[in-house]
Amino acid sequence: MEITYRKVDQDTLADFILIAGWANDESIKHLATPDFTGGGIPDVTAEELLDHVHARTGAYHYMILADGVAAGEFSIQIDPPQLLKKVKNTGWIGITIGRPEFRGRGIGRTAIGFIEDECRKLKLSRIELGVFEFNHNAIGLYRNMGYIELGVIEKFTCWQGSWYKDIRMEKYI
């Protein structure tokens, strides 16, 4: 399987329709979007995502393609406010493998390698991310790729009626 990447088209809704579909997928939305209230994670529209991207500076968005098919997406934000450790030239990353048939096939690992290369090109020296404590597969992947835990935020997200931590991890690149 050939994995390639392309920048998200920020001039049309097409990519954002795909991304919104993945963001609203009940089987994975709890892995990427926090439920801060315990009342559930509201759906998002493609238009809302597009507006959010246009309003934010210092962010890069990519589609992950598997054999030419959009399998997922990732973003890199430079020095965003949600960093736990305020270190200049840090990339905050988020990644979603949206299509179920591509999950568990090594695409996330390959994408993280590409993300790290992109962060180096952007002259970033550090990557930080957050992962919910119940996302054991992602935690294992990040640890295997050299990310270390730098802290936790208690009771960060609600899932299935219980509150969970957000584990913050970092890697110097």
Image (cartoon, helix red, strand yellow):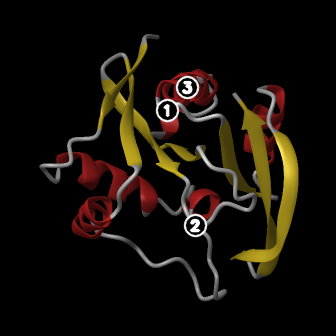
The three-letter code of the residue at mark 3 reads Arg
Residue extending farthest top = 1
Q: In the shown orientation, is residue 127 left or right of residue 151? A: left
**Quadrant (top left/top right/bottom left/bottom right) for the C terminus:** top right
Q: Which mark is residue 63?
A: none
Question: Where is residue 57 drawn, in percent x and y?
Answer: 35, 57
Nearer the observer, 135 or 100: 135
**In this rendering, which labeled residue sits more in front, label 3 or label 1?**
3
Q: In the shown orientation, is residue 105 left or right of residue 54? A: right
Question: Where is residue 109 drawn, in percent x and y?
Answer: 64, 25
Question: Where is residue 133 drawn, in percent x and y?
Answer: 82, 58
N-terminal of the two: label 3 or label 1?
1
Identify residue for label 3.
120
Residue at the spot 20% in from the left edge and 48% down from the top edge = 10
The three-letter code of the residue at mark 2 reads Pro
Which image quadrant for residue 9?
top left
Nearer the observer, 7 or 72: 7
Q: In the shown orientation, is residue 104 left or right of residue 153? A: left
Question: Where is residue 80 drawn, in percent x and y?
Answer: 54, 60
**Compared to 58, does 69 lie above or below?**
above
Identify residue for label 1.
101
- Mark 2 neighbour density, 10 Å: few (under 14) some (14–19) many (20 or more): few
Q: Which mark is residue 81?
A: 2
Q: What element carries label 1?
A: helix
Q: In the shown orientation, is residue 75 left or right of residue 173? A: left
Compute the Cα span from label 2 to label 1: 34 Å
- Mark 1 neighbour density, 10 Å: few (under 14) some (14–19) many (20 or more): few
How many numbered discs sit on the rendered protein?
A: 3
The three-letter code of the residue at mark 1 reads Glu
**In this rendering, which labeled residue sits more in front, label 2 or label 1?**
2
